[in-house]
Image (cartoon, grey):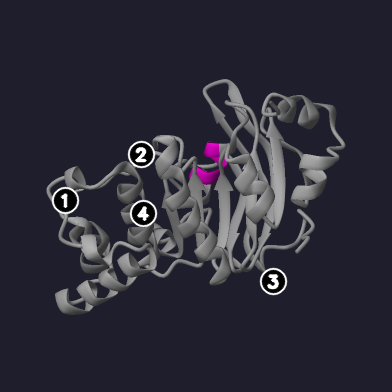
Amino acid sequence: MMLSPDLPGASSGVALSIENLHKSFGTEPVLKGLDLAVGRSEMVFVLGPSGSGKSTMLRCCNRLEEPDSGEIFIEGDRLTGPGVDLNKIRQRIGMVFQSFNLYPHLNALGNVTLALRQVQKMPRAQAEAAGLDALDRVGLSARARHYPAQLSGGQQQRVAIARALALKPSVMLFDEPTSALDPELVGDVLDVMRDMKAQGMTMLVVSHEMKFARDAADRVIFMDHGRIVETGPPEQIFGNPQEDRTRAFLSRFHG
């Protein structure tokens, strides 16, 4: 699926639209007029050097960072500007970080159901049924009563994914979801992401998992200095990048 970065936010085929997004920290511009449209059920991988603005872009999408200017839409609904209900936004845009951010005093099921009960005001029995279903989707229903300290890093990250999935979001954002994991644990998390893609989840992924990007992404974006330098299908970006900066970046990952 190929989508033009200037598709309007209200287009029926677009799940997430970013339009002319600017963000600075102090006097340092981090995002410089970013435009991006992610289609429904599309998996878009974002690559780029440290400091290129990748994580800031994701954090703006669920308003963990406030954009200085520009617009963000989810399925045509504006997320930016005054009067937006942030709790409702964050139920529609799930986010998974490199650190798992689980509550150590709650077991896996408790971590997954917390937002269902506190934000959606779901009764306990209904929340636990939804939580178990989400844990089953990531292959961890048998670990529902285990606490984070009893789980591997990969299992903790899968609980974090289940916590986001339980809210039934329209879009999932992943910010380096495997970077804190031991190498042998990375595959389980990537398998969950592959299954989510197969089930039609819209995903915007910041990651250095190049092989996974090549195999699983619908589209790959290369960012540098707060701008999108190049975008295209994986075979083009990895096999025949058009921009010097993209080639230079990818050359560091070839043995």
Mark 2, Cα crowd under 10 Å, few <14 / some 14-19 / many 20+, is some
Secondary structure character of the magenta stretch overall:
helix
Number of the label disc, if any, that sits on residue 147: 1
Q: Residue 99 carries which label?
A: 2
Pointer 3 with pointer 4, Cβ within 8 A: no
Residue 76 horizontal side relative to residue 128, left or right: right
Check disc 3 and report the residue beneath it. Answer: 13
Residue to which mark 4 is pinned = 158
The residue under the point 54% across, 60% down is 194
Pick whichever of labels 2 and 3 is earlier in the sequence. Answer: 3
Q: What residue type is labelled 3?
A: Gly
Q: Marks 3/1: CA distance?
A: 40 Å
Q: Is mark 3 on a helix, strand or loop?
A: loop
Q: What is the spatial separation of the Cα atoms under label 1 and label 2, in whole angstroms?
A: 16 Å
Q: Position of residue 231 (x, y in %)?
A: 77, 46
Q: Give the image location of residue 138, x and y in percent.
A: 38, 62
Separation of residues labelled 1 and 4 (CA atoms): 13 Å
Left or right of residue 180, residue 1 in this image: right
Quarter location, residue 51: top right
Choose the circle earlier in sequence order: 3 or 4: 3
Are there few (<14), some (14-19), or many (20+) residues within 10 Å of tag 4?
A: many
Give the residues in magenta.
Answer: 55-59
Q: Do the residues labelled 1 and 2 touch (CB within 8 Å)?
A: no
| Contact (Cβ within 8 Å) of mark 2 with mark 4 | no
Sequence order check: which comes first, mark 1 or mark 4?
1
